[in-house]
Image: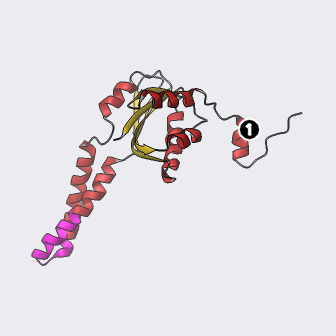
Amino acid sequence: MAELVVVGFENPTDADRVLTELTRLQKEYLIDLEDAVVAIRSPDGSVRIKQSVNLVSLGAASGGLRGALWGSLIGLLFLNPLAGFAIGGAVGAGSGALSGNMIDYGINDDFIRSIGDTLKPETSALFLLIRKSQPEKVMAELSGFKGRVIRSSLSPEQEAKLQAALSRAHPPSPSDGLEAAGEMAPPVS
């Protein structure tokens, strides 16, 4: 069963940065995300939602492949498989893009908007639907980000551990960025 976690951040860029880090951790098989969404509240109060999965292009690609396959098979019946392939692919891609635009995959958009509306201006939130993870390793990797748990479906003990890790996090100092870029920090006299 997937776990839902919503973490709020005090600036509009941290949610994106954490999602980038989680994507890297996913490639290392430390976390398996089913869905991830960033909500950013702008100074004027509007909420911008950034989905991590582009459903329109995903629907167009899968619909195009299915349409091309069925078009080829039908084209074989009429002795013109290439025309069936082309027509079926075009129709399939169009219908797949349309269905991808209408489908709500993963985290409910209305839920995201309702939480996003409660954010203060110039803040952000990260919505995660997690299939499985190695919590200790993931929290250690995200120790540089400070946030607060807004909602979760975690057990009370797991949520307390996550909140404690987010509360004691310290933002990276400017010298950390220099050393990470391969430069030496200036000597202190």
Q: Residue 14 falls in which quadrant of the image?
A: top right
Q: Quadrant of the N terminus?
A: top left
Q: Position of residue 33 (x, y in %)?
A: 41, 45
Where 168 falls versus 180 (above or below)? above
Q: Residue 146 or 52: which is nearer the viewer?
A: 146
Residue name at image x 38 percent, y 35 percent: 4
Q: Amino acid at mark 1?
A: Ser
Q: Percent x, y for residue 174?
A: 71, 36
Question: Image check: 35 left or right of 139?
Answer: left
Residue 74 lies within the magenta run: yes
Instruction: Give me the residue at 32% from left, 47% from top.
Output: 55
Residue 133: give x, y in percent of width and height.
46, 44
- Residue in the foreground of this view, choosing between 178 and 2: 2
Q: Is 42 part of what is drawn in magenta?
A: no
- Location of residue 92 by image quarter: bottom left
Q: Which residues are magenta?
A: 67-83
Q: Main secondary structure of the magenta part?
A: helix
Identify the residue at the far right of this view: 189
Q: Position of residue 175 (x, y in %)?
A: 74, 38
Mark 1 is surrounded, within 10 Å at the Cα level, by few (under 14), some (14 to 19) or many (20 or more) other residues, namely few
Furthest-bottom residue in this view: 79
97 is higher (above) or lower (below) than 110: below
Q: As drawn, is 27 to the left or to the right of 56?
A: right
* In the rendered image, the vertical position of residue 75 relative to residue 176, given as above or below: below
Q: Secondary structure at mark 1?
A: helix
In percent of the image, x 12 and y 78: which residue is there? 79
Quadrant where the C terminus sits is top right
The residue drawn where x is 71% and y is 39% is: 176
| Of 79 and 140, the residue lying toward us | 140
- Residue hosting label 1: 175
